[in-house]
Amino acid sequence: MNMSNSDKNFTYPILPGWEKEDIITASNLYSAVANAYEVGIERDTLLNAYNAFKLVVPSKSEEKQIGREFERTSGYSIYKTIKLAHQTTSHRLKMED
């Protein structure tokens, strides 16, 4: 499982009761967001990871809670990254710090 292209080490938020597949799905989104900041990512790859994540975490409040925790530990914003992905028509996306 590719967690990140950098040597940064942070903990990914995991909700109690998640199955192994749910953890992998969430981790794929966290990794995609980290890649968007670190090296850039294909827009479709990011949005596919987000759409799969939304099947695991359909609740907006849980999504916000996870997003806050992820940003606190990593410095990367799921919300800002997905917002940019929805607003751009570019095939590739790179977040600016």
Image (cartoon, rainbow, N blue to C red):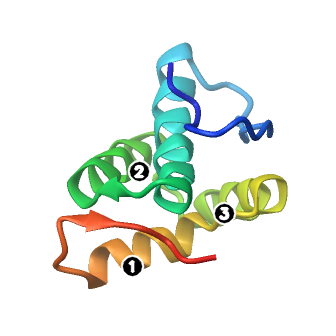
Q: Which residue is mark 1?
A: 84
Tag 3 or tag 1, which sits nearer the N-term?
3
Tell me the mark number nearer the camera, choosing from 2 and 1. 1
Tag 1: residue type? Answer: Leu
**Quarter of the figure that contains the C terminus:** bottom right
Percent from the top left, x then y, of residue 25? 46, 32
Tag 2: residue type? Answer: Lys
Is 49 situated left or right of 13 in this image? left
At a point 38% along the width and 52% down the height, the residue shown is 50
Tag 1 or tag 2, which sits nearer the N-term?
2
Helix or strand or loop: what does disc 1 sit on? Answer: helix
Image quadrant where residue 20 sits: top right
Q: Which mark is residue 54?
A: 2
Please, is residue 89 above or below residue 52 in the view? below
Q: Which residue is mark 3?
A: 76
At a point 72% along the width and 35% down the height, the residue shown is 7
